[in-house]
Amino acid sequence: MTKKSIELTCILDRFENSHGVLRFDFSQNDQQELVVAKRYLPQDVKEGDIIYLDLFSDKKATERRQNLARQMLEEILSGK
């Protein structure tokens, strides 16, 4: 995994059925929302709570997926 990560701060704006709506206030003109299943949120989280997300990329996992897709395509094209 790539060591460098980006931490984002958001607010649990509301719950909608089995999902939580996270609101990101990047600037006054740039507000975005992300809908996430409740099972991925901390158990005790409630509307208005601050949540931190840590984003990073995993180059090795990406390469594994690409290799698998390539192998599957080769099998399909070769008729095996």
Image (tube, rainbow, N blue to C red):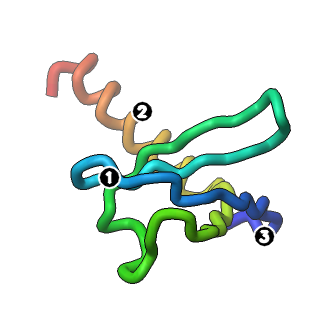
- Alpha carbon of mark 2 to alpha carbon of mark 3: how far? 27 Å
Please tell me whether residue 33 is drawn above or below residue 18 in the rendered image: above
> Disc 1 vs disc 3: which is toward the camera?
1
List the residue tagged with mark 2.
70
Q: How many marks?
A: 3
Residue at x-position 42% and y-position 69%: 41
Residue type for callout 2? Arg
**At 38% from the left edge and 66% from the top edge, which residue is drawn?**
40
Q: Is residue 28 left or right of residue 42?
A: right
Comparing 22 with 28, the one in front is: 28
Q: Position of residue 16 (x, y in %)?
A: 31, 47
| Callout in the foreground (1, 2) | 1
Sequence-wise, the earlier of marks 2 and 3 is 3
Q: Name which of mark 1 and mark 2 comes first in the sequence.
A: 1
Residue drawn at x 65%, y 57% as measured from the top left: 10
Pointers 2 and 3 in contact (CB under 8 A)?
Answer: no
Residue 19 disc label: 1
Residue at image position (67%, 47%) is: 24
